[in-house]
Image (spheres, rainbow, N blue to C red):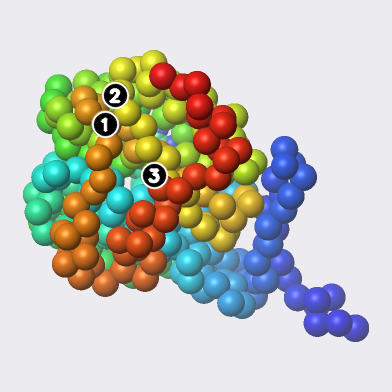
């Protein structure tokens, strides 16, 4: 009998794209049904611990650095001088850890709707929570939609939306009303960056959320693409939206000199992430 017959697997089936993703597991370590989501933790044979929310892979010990670095460093090095940062979602705290590597950042507020995600991260992904006690960090548990609606005008330099997919509690983070709240809270030159799904299997969603950002009044958009092994298709994006000006490069010298101890991000990766394939450029061609 082949080893596969006895091996246990966690499999996420993504019906709309007729695809699935699996990781060999040794055990389910924990699970909790919060008021918002069902959170599961598995031990895997090759990827360390795995967090799953409502059946969707979120983070694994082995590869999460790619995503957390690409959700933070490009936007922070594109902003001329980010001081006040807000993370919507991000309950596993990996993005928070990356943002706090930027010494110029003075405050980071992380607002995740589900406290149980952070409690599970503290227990099973302590490396992602290593910066949670940084005096610049404030970790709150609330609805990010409400937080941004109530945020003081022109009080934030960068908003990072590290949320689940646009279903359940995350749905309201992908529409014009939310983007208008973000625009209002950003200072001139401020940047919103949001995980914007897969260019291969979510192209319409990505195009629609970009259009909603423009309709909300953002002046310019920049979609970056990067590998993300444990999400559907393994090919992911984040989209930067700028409040009051276009994109003209990023602080390359600062990024090269920062020595942020990253595993994936560097200035060449940043530049390469901006290169979009023809089918994606075509989908964006008429957006304004
Ligand atoms: N990297 C993951 C991805 O791209 O799917 C996201 C990781 S992070 C764990 C996603 C977080 O978004 C979850 O912790 C979830 O609780 C949070 N979230 C979903 N809807 C939210 C909302 N309306 N306000 C704040 N946080 C929200």
Instruction: Name the residue tied to disc 2.
Output: 219
Q: Position of residue 107 (x, y in %)?
A: 13, 47
Q: Residue at x 41, y 19 (%)?
A: 288
**Label 1 lies in ligand 1 vicinity (Cβ under 8 Å):** no
Q: Is residue 102 above or below residue 280?
A: below
Residue 246 is left or right of residue 258, and the answer is right
Residue 189 appears at what percent x and percent y? 17, 32
Q: Viewed as shown, does residue 75 lie left or right of 282?
A: left
Whether ligand 1 has any atom under 8 Å from the Cβ at mark 3 is answered as yes
The disc, 1 or 2, on the residue closer to the chain's N-terminal end is 2
Instruction: Mark 3 or mark 2: name the one nearer the start of the chain.
Output: 3
SS of the residue under disc 2: loop
Instruction: Single out the residue that lies furthest toward the right.
Output: 1
Residue picked out by circle 3: 162
Relative to the observer, which residue lies in front, 175 or 89?
A: 175
Percent position of residue 61, x then y? 46, 69
- Mark 1 lies on residue: 246
Residue in the image at 20% along x and 70% along y: 259
Kindly report which numbered mark, 3 or 1, lies closer to the viewer in this rendering.
Answer: 1
Q: Check the image and report above or below for 168 versus 73.
A: above
Q: Quadrant of the N terminus?
A: bottom right
Q: Are circles 1 and 2 on residues that touch, CB within 8 Å?
A: yes
Q: Residue at x 45, y 48 (%)?
A: 275
User: Local crowd at mark 1 within 10 Å, few (<14), some, or many (≥20)?
Assistant: some
């Amino acid at each position: 009998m082949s080893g596969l017959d006895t091996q246990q697997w966690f499999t996420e089936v993504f019906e709309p794209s007729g695809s699935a993703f699996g990781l060999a597991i040794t055990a389910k370590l924990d699970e909790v049904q919060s008021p918002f989501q069902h959170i599961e933790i598995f031990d895997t044979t090759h990827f360390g611990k795995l967090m799953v929310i409502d059946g969707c892979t979120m983070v694994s010990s082995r590869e999460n650095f790619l995503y957390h670095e690409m959700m933070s460093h490009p936007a922070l090095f594109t902003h001329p001088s980010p001081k006040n940062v807000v993370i919507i979602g991000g309950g596993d705290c990996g993005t928070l850890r990356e943002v706090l590597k930027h010494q110029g950042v003075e405050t980071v507020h992380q607002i995740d709707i589900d406290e149980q995600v952070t409690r599970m991260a503290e227990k099973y992904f302590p490396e992602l929570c290593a910066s949670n006690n940084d005096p610049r960090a404030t970790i709150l548990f609330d609805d990010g939609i409400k937080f941004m609606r109530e945020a003081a005008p022109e009080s934030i330099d960068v908003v990072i939306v590290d949320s689940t997919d646009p279903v359940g509690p995350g749905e309201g983070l992908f529409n014009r009303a939310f983007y208008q709240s973000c625009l209002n809270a950003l200072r001139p030159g401020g940047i919103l960056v949001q995980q914007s799904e897969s260019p291969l299997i979510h192209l319409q969603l990505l195009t629609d959320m970009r259009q909603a950002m423009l309709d909300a009044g953002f002046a310019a958009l920049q979609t970056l693409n990067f590998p993300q092994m444990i999400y559907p298709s393994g090919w992911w994006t984040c989209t930067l939206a700028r409040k009051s000006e276009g994109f003209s490069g990023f602080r390359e010298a600062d990024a090269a000199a920062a020595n942020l101890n990253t595993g994936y991000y560097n200035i060449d990766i940043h530049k390469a992430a901006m290169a979009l394939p023809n089918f994606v450029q075509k989908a964006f061609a008429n957006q304004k």
